[in-house]
Every structure is written in C-alpha cells, then in structure tokens.
Amino acid sequence: MRTEKARKNIIGYIFSSPFLIFTLVMWLYPFIWGLIISFKKWNLISPSQPWVGLQNYIKVIKDPMLWIMIRNSVYFMLVFISLTTATSLLVALLIKQIPRFKGLFITGFLLAYVSSGVAYSMVFNLLFSGDGMINNFLANFNIKIGWFTNPKIAMASIGLIVCWKFTGYYALFFLSGLNNISESLYEAAKIDGANAWQRFIKITVPMLNPTFVMITVFATITSFNLFTEPFMITGGGPMDATRTMMLEIYNRVFSLLQAGYGSTLAIVSGIITFIFVWVLRQIIERDDIYE
Amino acid sequence: MKKIKIFALTIMMVILVGTMAQAVTVNFWTAPNSQQESFWSDVVANWNQENPEKQINWKVIPAGNSSEEVILTALATGTGPDFTTNIFTGFAAQLINNDYLVPFNKFDGFEKLLENRSMENIVKEGWGYNDNYYVLPLYTNPIAYWWNEDALNKLGVEVPRTYQDVIEIAEQYNNPAENKYTLLTRYKPNWWDRWYDFGLSYYAAAQGKPYWNLEEVLFNDEYSLKYMEFIDTMVENNYSPLENYQDPVQKGIVLGSIEGPWNIKYTEKTYPEFNYVIAPPLVPDDYPENEEVYTFADTKGIVMLTKDEEKQQLVWEFINWYFSDIEHDVKWLEVTNMLPAREDVLEKEQFEFYLSDNPKLAEYAKLLPYSIPPALNSKTIELQTELNSVLWEPVIYDKKTPQEALNDAEKALNEIIDS
C-alpha cells in the first residue's frame, strides 16, 4: 500500500517537474539573486560588489522619483482599468448577441493582444504625431493635441494604447462570465417587470463580480509592470510624466549601471503592487453574490 | 577502388577537421544600421576569404535602446564580443575604468598605423585616456543645421547665423495653425539627444570649449545661458513645436533643424524635391562674424575587449589590415556617407572624387577641422540623463528660468561627478 502511494508520488513529481524546474530556474533563482544584489552596490560589469546593508532601500524610499512613479502608475491604472473594463465588457456583450461567427470576432479582437508591443507602439506614435492621422482629423476643428508631449495627458494617451491591446483579451473573460449566468435569472426578472438596464445592473454586474475582481487584479499588475509603450514612445518623459517602475528599473540597471539600486526598486515595486492588489480586492470582492 | 576512395575521403576529412581546429575565430560586432551592416559584411567576407585560418565571426550589435546598453549587458553576462565598433569616448572611459579594454599602443606598429591612416593628431589629441589609446576612431560626423532653402528664398532672407536672426525670421514665418514652425527642438529624454542640441550649441558659442571635464561641470556661464534663453524664447512663442513629427524639416513643418550627414541619402531618396542649405550651428548675437564656428562631432571608434592574447593578435592584424588600406575608407564613405576619421579627407583625391559628386556631404566635410567629440567623462550617460531632467525639460516646459535651471544642473551634475 505504502509502496503504491510512493510510486504515485514519484509519478506526480515527474509530471510536475518541468514546471517546478522552470520555476526554480526562471523565477526563484533570479528572485533570490535580485534580493542579494539589492543589499550591494554593483555596477553590473565590475567584479567588486560591496555590501551596503539597507542603504539602497533608504535611498529608494527617500528618492522623490519613487512617489512620481507611484503617482504615474495610479494615474495610468485609473485610466486603464476604467476604460478597458468598459470597452471589454461592451465587446463581450456585443459578441454574446452575435448569433454566428463568434470565434472570428474573438480572434480579431485577440490579435491586438498577441501583436508585438514594439510594432504597435511605433504605429501609435505615428498615428498620434503632430501630423499624424488623429491630429490631422482634429485640425478640422482647430484642435492640436500633443498626445505624448503634453505632461498632463501623456500617460492617459499611453493608457489608450494599452486599452486597445487588452480590450479583446479581457472581453474573453467577460464573455466566459456572461455565459455562466443562468438564463432563468433573466427570465424571472423579466416576469417581475425589470427592464434591460435593471437586468444589467441587478443581475449581470453582480454576477460578473469574480470577473471584475480578476480583471482588476490583472490590470493593476499590468499598470505597475508597464514598460514597452513608454520605453518605445516617450522614454519616460515629458517631465517624467510617463516614468514607470519598470522603466526606471531598466534605466537604473542598464543605462546607469546601478544594479543594486535597480534590484531594490524591483523589490519595492513588487511590494507596492501587492499592497494595491490586496486593497483593491478588499474593496471590490464580494462573497455574497449567490446568497 | 571503392576502399581507396573511402580511405582518401577519410584522410581529407581528417585534414579538414585538423585545419578547422587550428583556425582562430574572433567575434566582431558593428553598429546596427543597414549601411554599416552592408559595409562590414563585405569587408569581413574579404578578410575571411584571404585568411582561412584567422576567421572573423561578424554580427551587428543586437537590437536595444542603445548600443552601449546592449554591449554592457553582453559583457555582464559573458557574451560580449572580442572587438566592436560604435564606441564613443565617454563609454570607452567607462569600460576602461572597469578594466575591459585593451590599449592599442601596446602592440607593435601602433605608431606606424596612425601614420598610415593619417590619424595621428586625431587619436593623440582626442582619444587618449591615462596615457594610453584604447579606441581607434572610424568616422567623424560633424553635425550641422539644415535650412529649407525654398522657404528662405520666398521670405527673402539669408541663412540665419545668430539666435536673433532665427527669432526675426520666426516672427515673419511661424504659423502653427498651418503646421509651419521655425526650428525643431528635440524634447525626448534620450540621454544622447543632448549632444545634438546642448552640446553642439555650447561648442558653437564657446568656441570649442568643453562643457565638462573629468573633475567638474564647466557650462554654467554666459554661453549656455544665452543658448537656453534662446530655446526658452523659441518654445514660449511656439516657434518650436513640441509635438512629435516624422521628418519635419523635409516636409516643411519646420524651417530648420539639426541633422547629421547620415540623413543626406535618405532625404535624397525620400524627398527628392526638398532643397536645403547646410550651415554651421547658430551662435549668440555678439559672436564675431568672421570667426569660424565650432560644432559637435558624432564620432565613434573601434575597441578591443578580448583578454586572450592569441585573439588579441588576430584582432590587431585585422585592424592593421583594415586601416592600412585607404580603399576601405573610400568604400566606407561611399556606402555609409559618413566621413572617415582621417586628417587627409579634404586632401586625398580618392575622397575628393566622391565629395565633388556629393556636394551636401562636402559641406559637412568643410566643418571637420572645427568638429569636436563629446566632452570626456566616464559618467557621460548619467550626466546627460540628469542634464535632461534638471536643465532641458524644466526650461522647455517652463518650470524654471534658464539661469535657475543652469544653477541646479551645475549642482546636480557636480554631485554625480564627485560620487
């Protein structure tokens, strides 16, 4: 009996070993190495790596740039979550109504998600440029917008691009959530005289709560991990308006060769992201939907 | 018969494998742009054909934000090249301080090589570090202003020379509603962008004086103040656009902009109707009219990184072979449209022949004697990143006066140098 159990355990470990090995090599090892570096002063290419204790952590917390980056991420998060949740829910509702070729539409929307961040950033940079298609259209109304050069709106413009990327992807989650809502709930509400808007607010939205929570968690992590779009389009400017944690980590490590400081920032960034996700879950997660 | 054939084939394979085992191979990286890629591909192929036992394994520097970042990452992970091009003085100094570069002057024939390629003064005056020479310059691109010739003629004005000339032209010409601006101002926070506006203009105003050295910042003076006040005026009056444009000078969106010679061929091909004048950098209003104007030189060189002595010898042989033949520089000029870092570019008939057929590039060549490489400091990237945050952006986004920004920049940059 014991031998049979041991045999099953071994088989289990064999099957899960590719993932365990992958996690150990690609996640745990870099994480521990990053943690060690965060207590050192190292310029990435020098053999000398002196220990500096908590010096890097104190510098990061005292650095005004940290608060600028948190502000930028929160600004992005507000634009991105509100916009993407609305557009993806709308897309999901529309796709649910379509009687045929649902797969085709879903694939079409997903193309944005799988396209190269570098490529679409360049395309959007041209579209939003001073003589790009958007500003040429706005010129008809005597309007010209410095989408990526006005510090007040540069981050919102990046939010628009990332929203374009994620709408189709998040719509899939909403579609799956919508398909899980029992039709009998809508039929009962109809008999009780509820109109379409009331059915949406009283049934669809509460029943989609787990999907909202999941998308908010994903979107929050995306907000704090934002890199490709500001890297390609604005470089963190103008006036640090699009400087994000990931961009700063990259700049510190690879441009300024401050590997210790960059690693510390990566750990602090992870902690901040965790706190935001936890707080948001506390606010929007509900356990009483099915009661 | 069949057995003899198999035996002969085996012997040949053994010989071939033996020969391959003896061949030394070195990894060589070059700048990631199509012209240089085409040039080095041919040069390395010729070398490899002539030297089957001394092979060069060539590739372009992998894609990244900047060559410097890619090379540093490669060095940190132990995947760097044995020698590479595309190195500017500040980056070389950074590599030297971390003991990555091999001085070329330790090899026999170094002096002879400098003489053969006619680059003795260039190397000894601008590329030395700690009494050694770690970089051999490949090219020198003077940077200049391009002015839309048709628009200037239409306005009936001369090519502007001073800041005030530009402001006067802007008062007549500028019309943002019609996408007509006067001067392009780069707003992007890329550290290297400050070479092409601040660095260039400081050299022009201060007659070639460096904006910093190894010990301290030198730019908080009347020259940079006048330039930053000029930029402030241009942006404040909307004479310089802050939106992003693709090829704004070629499309007639701006009247003038700062450009390098690498854009000549692209412009000829893409905008054949565009007529423009190449002029030295703008200078302050009190700059003497008959004085020559200095400019910034975008100049990069080749460095050796390998610590293996056998490989070092191969790299040195290749470099000797490359620099000793003037035809390589002639071909370089033809393929890349960038001026070789030689003192005789304006004298040798091989170059004259090409320059007479390419008058726009000849205009750049005239600036060579007054073209100065980046001011030397091993913390160039950090300094220019800070220069952007503390000086450039606060002035163009009207957060500080030019003098306040200069004072703050001097303090912040000196702290970086001292750290």
Image (spheres, rainbow, N blue to C red):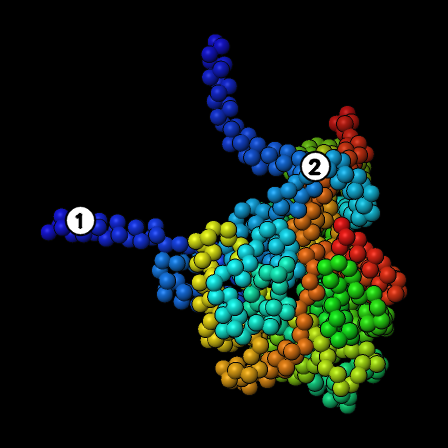
Task: Give coordinates of residue B73: x percent, y percent.
Answer: 59, 50
User: Residue at 71% across / 69% down in the picture?
Assistant: B196
Q: Residue furthest left?
A: B1
Marks 2, 1 in one chain: no
Q: Is residue A1 left or right of residue B142?
A: left
- The disc at residue A51 is 2
Q: Secondary structure at mark 2?
A: loop
Name the amino acid, label 1.
Phe
- Tell me the crowding category of disc 2: few under 14, some 14 to 19, or many 20 or more residues within 10 angstroms, Cα based: some
Name the amino acid, label 2.
Trp
B263 in relation to A105, above or below? below
B90 in relation to B159, above or below? above
User: Residue at 63% across / 36% down in the picture?
Assistant: A33
Task: Give coordinates of residue A100: x percent, y percent.
Answer: 59, 47
In front of the other: A237 or B305: B305
In front of the other: A214 or A171: A214
Q: Chain of mark 1?
A: B
A209 in relation to B257, above or below? above
User: Residue at 48% across / 26% down in the picture?
Assistant: A14
Q: Which residue is mark 1?
A: B7
B300 in relation to B337, above or below? above
Task: Give coordinates of residue B209: x percent, y percent.
Answer: 75, 71
